[in-house]
Image: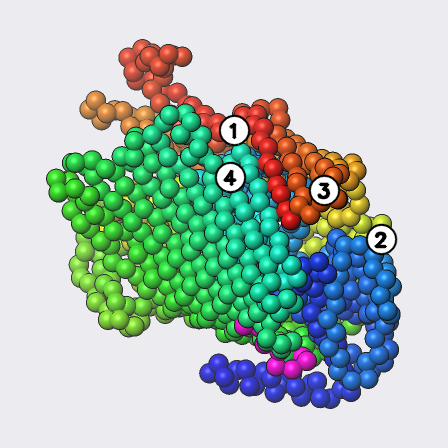
Amino acid sequence: MIRIFIVVTLALVSSMARSQDKVTLNGYVKDTDNGEELIGVTVYIPELKAGTATNAYGFYSITVPKGKYEVQYSFVGYTSQSVSITLDADVSRNIELGGVAQIMNEVEISERPIDENVIAVQMSKNTLNMSQVKKLPTLFGEVDIIKNVQALPGVISAGEGTSAFFVRGGGGDQNLILIDEAPIYDASHLGGLVSVFNADVIKESELYKGGIPSRFGGRLSSILEVRTIDGNNKRLGVTAGIGTMASRVMIEAPLKKDKSSFILSGRTSNLGLYLTAADTENKINFYDLNAKINWRANNKNRFFLSGYTGRDNISFSGGDIGFGWGNSTATFRWNHLFNERLFSNTTLIASNFDYSFEIKDPIQGFKWTSSLQEVSLKNDLTYFINVNNEFTFGYHLSGRRFSPALVEPNSDESMFERTEFDKMYALDHGIYISNQRRITEALTLDVGLRLSIFQNMGPGKVYLYEDPKDNADPTRIDSMDYKSWETVKTYINLEPRLGIRYSLSDDKSIKLSYNRMVQNTHLIAAGTVPLPFNTWSPSGYYLKPQIADQIALGYFQNLKDNMYEASVEVYYKDAQNITDFADNAEIQLNKNLTTEYRQGDAWSYGAEFMVNKKEGRLTGMVSYTWSKALRQIEGVNQGREYAANYDRRNVVNMNAAFELNDKWTFGGAFTYSTGRPTTVPSAKYEYGSYLPDAVTERNGYRLPAFHRLDLSATLNPRKNANRKWKGQWIFSIYNVYSRKNAFTLYTRTKQDSDGNIIGDGTEKEARMVYLFPFMPSVTYNIKF
């Protein structure tokens, strides 16, 4: 079926292309200094008022009528070039861009053309520029891409000390996080103090919040796509740093100059050294390893092999209590150019996420492990018909194995017996097609469709219940056994996508987008924040796929020769089969977990305002988001409507970097948000001598407002200019005015300042938990 799909599509677009006497200009755009392909470079032909952009692999293709043109190549942070090219036949032209003006034959410096903010059909997408991110303040001196994502409009942070984020009313598990196309199921180190992404190896990262392209599927709310650098193919380079939180080193070099290169990077925490110096038996550490090899066989074939592994290990009480979690991924990619217009990317992916928890005790000792493995094969093709017409299409296949829990005694006297929950298996197919077409000079459409086919597979056993929603006393009445590769349940869904851009003028446009997203993996968690110790489960006999429809409208304008980008977006999202758990649900080690599931409706809407300055000595962003996120699920909050855990009505984010001179750069970041909802007891009742809390409303209370100011200063000594290796100092202050921001709230028996119980012990009080006060940090980086 897939072959027929591809043949028919190619036949269609080929017939359209043959009807016109046109030629194609294509090639790659690279960085002059290190040979890195540049993503998102604008390739623009002023005579035709048309252009394109390099794809995720630095490749571009533009088909135009025969003639002589001035082709402009431009990218933020690089010197633009205008190249005079005579196109009387197909031409392949590779371009190198540098950070300083260069005098070349037939090349002149030009003004940057209209930015992607206005001309691109894609809306609700934010690209994070790593050079800008590295100028901003950091926590513990670690540059963290996730912390910057949390500051984007439409994104809600779960709070300090966590890598979780929520996009346009969606849950933290509804974000697909990718590194070199491989999924990361938990992006946190140390529970969220820093993320798994080492800034040294990141080439570019993009967050899609709406109008999500049809090549993406599997999550409801957002796609965070992180791509790593390929490695310097011109010369040896070493980057290293030591900071308050971690130390790191990266080596990159050519294997064969201009043909192949590699990177090898490692990062490890310094916290173990501090704990040793403090003479404590507690242990806290994490590490990351990134590796990548790429080889250009010729201009039509390029191969990549990349991998990531990272892990956290934490132990307390002299090692008697310990837990750990980690991600491992491997990606093999083959870029192939069939002809000057047809570009293919074939990817083979493997990933693993696992966690463990252990208590070492002669009687109560046990070890609990859980894991999720995924293997995927993807083929994505892009057919560049002409300057006004582009097709993308492909097929994705993923296989997953879910291992919810294995509990083993770790001593002969342990009270625990070996218990293993049934593994679950699933196949996920995705077939998609998309056509971006410029209808008139002002109107451009991007229409796509994705077919999602999900199969819950054997081997496995499905239990039937007298009442599947009776979690108080679940009664099994029968069971069904399924053999290997036997289908337990199949779900088929169509996911239409639509993007419309209408240009009001050269520097103004309005955009409209719609997308339907389907999610077949569900996070088994009762709390607000996704933690490493939560469990993932596939859609199946009882659990239906989650489905969300989102529509967004935006106005986009560039100011002062594209120095400023401004945008306003409004959106509405409606979701069904959203998974939550019944009040007072028992989640952990529950073999009747099916009876705890509850699915219902969720909806969210909001407005996002942003002004972004990308160029000049002063750069930065100001954004404001107003939003609401609501749910209504049978069996939760007595069936009444309630605010989602991440419903924060007002969020303001500001950041800026100012280059005082070639020596000093100063950065600042401020964030404010109204308090998030939380569930607290509203009463208590007596049950013998036991005084349990009574909760009458889900998320009926809000924590205080959150706000914080961070500052940084970066010192690049002038003597760097005269030596091969360059040193850099980064000084940061986190929470400058030491604001006590509430992380969570709990209740306890009322006590005095010394911990003595007040009265008869029946009176209770609420207590706030705060994480980080005023915290300075320093990092020293070297590069050569």
Residue 154 placement (x, y as % from top left): 61, 47
**Crowding at mark 3 (Cα within 10 Å: few <14, some 14-19, many 20+):** few
Residue 251, can we see it? yes
Identify the image's colour scheme: rainbow, by chain, secondary structure or one colour.
rainbow
Residue 106 placement (x, y as % from top left): 87, 70
Left or right of 468? Residue 76 is: right
The secondary structure type at the circle numbered 2 is loop
- The residue that disc 1 covers is 772
**Amino acid of disc 4:** Ala
The secondary structure type at the circle numbered 3 is helix
Q: Is label 2 or label 3 in front?
A: 3
Residues drawn in magenta: 334-341
Q: Is label 1 or label 3 in front?
A: 3
**Crowding at mark 1 (Cα within 10 Å: few <14, some 14-19, many 20+):** some
**Amino acid of disc 2:** Asp
The secondary structure type at the circle numbered 1 is loop
**Mark closest to the chain's N terminus, 2 or 4:** 4
Report the Cα–Cα distance between label 2 and label 1.
41 Å
**Mark closest to the chain's N terminus, 2 or 1:** 2
Q: Is label 2 or label 4 in front?
A: 4
Say above or below: 181 vs 429: above
Q: Residue 561 — which label?
A: 2
- The residue that disc 4 covers is 246
